[in-house]
Image: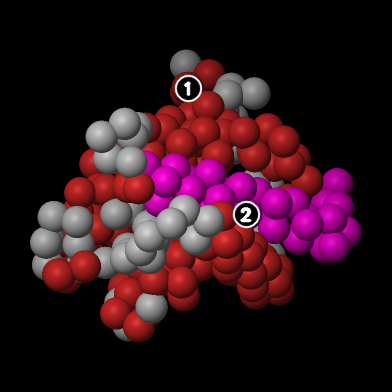
Amino acid sequence: MKLPMKYRLGAEFFGTFWLVFGGCGAAIFDAAFPKYGIGHGGVALAFGLTVLTMIYAVGYISGGHFNPAVTMGFWASGRFSGKDVLPYVVIQVLAAIAAAGLLYVIAIGKPGFQTDGFASNGYGALSPGNYGLLSCLITEIVCTFFFVTVILGATSARAPVGFAGLAIGLTLTLIHLISIPIDNTSVNPARSTGPALIAGAPWIHQLWLFWLAPIVGAVIAGVVHRWFATMPSAATAK
């Protein structure tokens, strides 16, 4: 049974807030102590753990999107109502902004703290590895496509029950291991928006890519999932 929208939006706010606070927080505070920090692997794991924990904590309330691209993917797959897309996206972005704001309040408590990129995403001069626009565009589309494909498959009625959170969290970890050096990993327009507003104009000007590419990848995944859904299950095919 679908719960009232206020409860679903509340769950999406908490889940998205935790994703940005935990994942971006790990990146921001790791950068402040590079000699003793957790490195890219630790940051990747932090993002995966935020999604994994929130799927089990509040995913049963809202579906556990925590990401405008995931919401668009569910819509494209036919498993989410179009009228619910905008409220979900708005609350996800607001949660990301709130989390980034709280991270900033914590971060400036360290003397000499420099905002720099503030865990934002970027291409060209703003890319961690100086990768160009096309490289980052392709990376975001492909990574989001596979992320949303895993989410839709793991949460389908024919998937093993109880393992969706684990599959999704590990997939997000893998995606970060691949793409942190390329563009600092988005696959989530809300996650990109919150930190960029703190980082400043150069990162804000590049936000378009981190909205466009994840949504394109997610919508393609949703369409492909519709095709997968028409296939017989392994049990039926025997």
Q: Is residue 75 visible?
A: no
Query: Distance from label 1 to label 2 (Cα)?
Result: 38 Å
Q: Whole-percent x and y of residue 185?
A: 32, 53
Instruction: Name the residue located 69 percent from the left edge and 58 percent from the top edge.
Output: 13
The three-letter code of the residue at mark 2 reads Phe
* Crowd band around label 1 with a 10 angstrom C-alpha radius: few (<14), some (14–19), many (20+): few
> Of marks 1 and 2, which one's residue comes earlier in the chain?
2
Q: Which mark is residue 190?
A: none
Which span is picked out in magenta? 1-30
* Residue at (78, 57) in percent of width and height: 10
Answer left or right for 90 relative to 4. Answer: left
Label 1 SS: helix
Dot 2 crowding, Cα within 10 Å, few <14, some 14–19, many 20+ = many
Q: Which residue is mark 2?
A: 17
Residue found at the far front of this picture = 111
Tag in front: 1 or 2: 2
Q: Which residue is mark 1?
A: 234
Q: Position of residue 161 (x, y in %)?
A: 64, 23
Say left or right for 192 vs 101. Answer: left
Of the pair 34 and 91, the residue shown nearer to us = 34
Q: What colour scheme governs how the chains and residues are painted in the rendered image of this protein?
A: secondary structure
